[in-house]
Image (cartoon, rainbow, N blue to C red):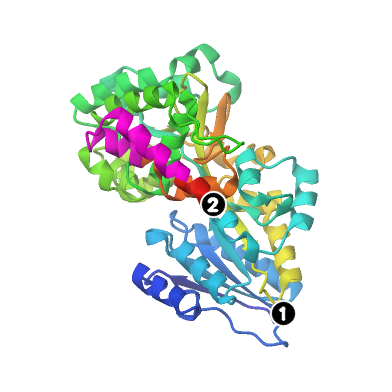
Amino acid sequence: MSRLKVTRRTRITRRTAVKQLALGTAAAVAAPYMRGASAAGKLTLGCWDHWVPGANKALTALCTEWGEKNHVEVQIDYITSTGDKDKLTAAAEAQAGTGHDIMSHRDWNINVHHRMLYPVNDVIDPLVKQYGPVTPVAEYLANIDGAWCGVPATIGSQVKPCCSRLDLYRQHAGIDLQDLFPPDESKYDPAKIDSWNWQLYLESATKLYKAGFPIGLPMGQTSDAVDWVSALFNSFGVVMIDKKGDIKIDSAETRSALEYLQKLMAVSPPEVYAWDDAGNNRWLISGKGSSIMNPPSAWAVAKRDNLKVAENCWTHAVPRGPKGRFVGQLPFFYGIWKFSQNKSAAKELLLFLSQKDSARQLVEASSGYDLPTFKSFYDFDTWKKVEPPLGTVYSYPPRGDEQTSIAGYPALPDVGAQIYNQAIGPVMVAKFTQGKEKLDDVVKWAANELEGYLRT
């Protein structure tokens, strides 16, 4: 009889992981299932530990269902991303050449480990034929020279639009966000949506700051900060390195974006420079914050811990810039290690988890947090029906003129990964706003950093 074993791994420290990586072993980090030739009917998964309470249960149930039908024993280890423990685990397994059969990866980690990942074109191709193309960001990150090295995952995949307090925006900024972004795309008014730009965002943030309810946008070297800053940069037309490998950071667009951010950070709480990826969530849930840029996890936790806040949350599009409206996208992927001893079963499980009905169950369990990579999946009822208030996360999937983006694009992936992982955008902003460095010096610093990435 098949069975599924689930564990949650959250006690690993960065020091421990780095030490084990240096020793070339992943045994204590990832607790790999050590198998022999007779273990063909088993699969081990290292999966991201979801922020939304109860969301892991849906993935566990799907894997149980698939395992029972296919007589495969499936073991799942849920690994926290706090302190990048999921990335450290993946690095240790890649170094040691042993660990889970399937590992979840986020942002640039597919590119980082692509030489150790088994190609999955025969999983992706039928999915694209059935459901249409994946998002450009997902393809940019996981299609390496024509070889798909990861399967886009519904679990964890996200964008970072605004999640704002309806009551605070009405009372202190005079803006009705429900009127701007109603829970029905057919009722979007292009003129009203066009008015939601970075200038209006700054004006409203200033009013909210004076009222004692500042916006909360992280500015540390974390993924939440990298994602929203890079989206703003893209909306201003900032390019760090182009497709040809030419450094383009020294531009009027870069200076305009930084000058704008100087004004925006002046009406932000000073602690944002030290926030981790949970800082903005805590800020909104506490009742002090008026708006963040995040998936619906903060709202989902507020529904449990601070219902008054949850009842006034509204997820909606990010502001428009001179070059368009861009929202940061953070796709998650499943990768099959080349050292996996059950690649055939691994591919079959990933194909099953990628089906529309599977994705529907995962989206429902996460209250709309998880965002499938296929736009044809954006018709799920979850985004229309979850509450309170009704329709609160309808505009979470990119709709209307909102485009997805990621820091590093359009540079070649090896370079783009460094731009993202070194958080060049937020560091530039912090140097200029918190560090009070001269604008020209900040741009020159960034150019030198980018030149170093090209050399390596």
Magenta span dominant secondary structure: helix
Tell me, yes or no, whether the highlighted magenta stretch contains residue 434.
yes
- In the picture, the disc for residue 222 is none
Amino acid of disc 2: Trp
Under tag 2, what secondary structure?
A: loop
Lower position in the chain sequence, tag 2 or tag 1: 1
Nearer to us: label 2 or label 1: 2
Task: In this rendered view, identify the residue nearer to me: 111 or 105.
Answer: 111
- What is the x, y in percent for residue 102? 62, 67
Range of residues picked out in magenta: 427-451
Q: Quadrant of residue 134?
A: top right
In the displayed structure image, the side of residue 279 where residue 10 appears, left or right: right
Under tag 1, what secondary structure?
A: loop
Task: Judge whether 93 appears above or below 372 on screen.
Answer: below
- Residue at 70 percent of width and 64 percent of height: 118
Task: Judge whether 57 appears above or below 416 on screen.
Answer: below
- What is the x, y in percent for residue 368? 52, 44
- Residue at 45 percent of width and 29 percent of height: 318
- What is the x, y in percent for residue 341? 70, 77
Amino acid of disc 1: Gly
Q: Residues within 10 Å of mark 1 (few under 14, many from 20)?
A: some
- In the picture, the disc for residue 108 is 2
- Residue at 24 percent of width and 34 percent of height: 437
Tell me, yes or no, whether the highlighted magenta stretch contains residue 24.
no
Task: In this rendered view, identify the residue nearer to me: 437 or 374.
Answer: 437
Task: In this rendered view, identify the residue nearer to me: 112 or 159.
Answer: 112
Q: Which residue is mark 1?
A: 41
Q: Quadrant of residue 12?
A: bottom left
